Amino acid sequence: MNNTTNGFKPRARKAGLVVRELSGELLVYDRERNQAHSLNETAALIWKHCDGHSTIAELRSTLEAETGASVDEQVVRYALRKFTKLSLLEEPLRASVGERRLSRRELIQTIGLAASVPLVVSIFAPSVFAAASCTQTCTVPADCTVPGCPNCPVPGGKCSA
Amino acid sequence: MRHSFPLPATSRSKLLAKLLYHSWRTSILSLQISESELAAIIPLLTGSGASALASARIRDSNLRNSAPALDLQQAHRLHAVHAAAFEEDLTNVITLLRNAGVEPILAKGWAVARLYPDTSLRPYGDIDLYVRPGQYSSAMRVLASPEGKRFVVDLHEGFDSSEGISIDALYERSRLVSLADVKVRVPCDEDHLRILCLHFLRHGAWRPLWLCDIAVAVETRAPEFDWDICLGTNPRRADWVACSIGLAHRLLGAEIAGTPVVDRAQTLPAWLISNVLKQWETPYSMSQPPVNYAAPMSKYLRDPRGFLSDLRRRWPNAIEATVYTGGPFNDLPRWPFQIGECMIRTGKFLARTLRPDRDD
């Protein structure tokens, strides 16, 4: 498939992802890469409608219908590029030759409303945070299985705690 | 009824308690805490797994957009995605065990997180499963298989007799609750509250989240909750449970009106509250035994250097020592129980070391 054309029908990746809504954000946890992302309302709407049947133009129309506001196709393309970068799509969106990629700043200047820009932010732990009772002492990182475990005596590792 | 935090927040642990006061409730009272005070206890909150509760606690306060609050929100997001991942794991591992003919009981972890308004408020890092002794080896085989190895399971053979509940009674009174399309077997409310209380004390009460669990379990109990089952028939254990609930009331504002522990909550020994607050000054796994030991005791048999300084780390905390030795929660000094625990542990160490069939 030519993923650079308007015929591209993006499909949101499902395998290996865990999704949860929290206070208006859509949180996506990539279990294969151990990465977590937060999607704002616009990004979440676009991602949820990436069903493998809708083209970029159709996604734009859907977004317009759901938000009741005019939506520039660049908004959808910007979100799809973000999803591609974070492996949140089954097939990546590839840039056409000569296609100009708008930055977030340029996108805000183009559409004029920062709140409408699809935001995808990666989540990092501020510090240790897990709450588990220690059941074993790991001697090598391979022993450990809980990300962010505060019990882990192995620097940079995880702990089966 | 409006409550206010009863202790002057003069230390970090009292600030921590003040912030967590009623934090599990959906309707939260106003919070009088400054940004610098919040910043001072951020390590305690993030290090002990209480950041999501703290984030919820300050969401309607003027601190919600402060720098420390953003740290807490970030941790809450991580708790939320990890909770979703663990819930997926939990349904998968229970299905896997059931397919092998093993019926596990889940305690703590998700079994208590589900009592909070949102499971993301109460992080957990493993899945505590209890199985009948006759099913333990089957369960181990399942968990050692390539499919089972993916899950972080703390598998328990039967049930610790020190809890005062037999595995048969635990199963008989257990109930099934829904998680996605799977039914998860959990202890009945009475057994679970008792398990939470004794677990809190046995580990020296160092994690504030455990006391929040007790508070939530008390406040979400069903109207037909049977206190006789919860407190059990052993008067000493019943008093430990009552004191744990009393601590949840005194430190975190758990509502206990109409329960049989109201009077006991007002007569808690002074050393108990002060010891909990002392533990909460460093509520990190790395600060707790055995992780904080410098070296195993066997090392000091070969090379005694550093033994005396490590011995200080091994001095048991008063709560843990009292429970370990089966002592009462009264106003007498705790050092006899602490010495008692040291002697018992030393005896066990020597018995292991001098055993003729030792591997090493």
Image (tube, coloured by chain):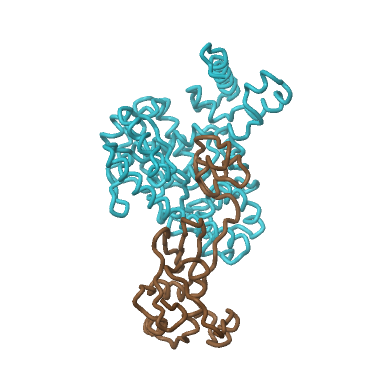
Residue B303, given in percent of the width and then of the height, sits at 71, 21
> How many marks on residues?
0
B267 displayed left or right of B277: left
Residue positioned most to the right: B305
Left or right? Give the position of B102 relative to B278.
left
Quadrant location of the N terminus of chain B in the rendered image: bottom left
Say which of B50 and A28 sits in front: A28
Residue A48 occupies quadrant: bottom left
Write the residue at 30% across / 45% down.
B95
**Residue A63 visible in image:** no
* Chain that is brown in the image: A
Q: Is residue B118 left or right of residue B273?
A: left
Residue B313 lies, with reference to residue B25, above or below; the image says above
Query: Would you say residue B164 is visible in this rendering?
Result: yes
Q: Nearer the viewer, residue B318 or B273?
A: B318
Quadrant where the C terminus of chain B lies? top right
Q: Is residue B163 above or below residue B56?
A: above
Q: Is residue A139 left or right of residue A30?
A: right
Residue B179 x/y as whole percent = 32, 52
How far from the left and from the top, in percent, is residue B135?
A: 31, 31
Work out which residue is located at the far top of the displayed protein and give it: B356
Name the residue rendered at 58%, 30% in the picture.
B317
Residue plotted at (40% across, 47% down): B110
The spot of residue A18 in percent (x, y) is 42, 59
Observer-nearest of B231 and B92: B92
> Which quarter of the picture shows residue B213?
top left
Chain B appears what colour?
cyan
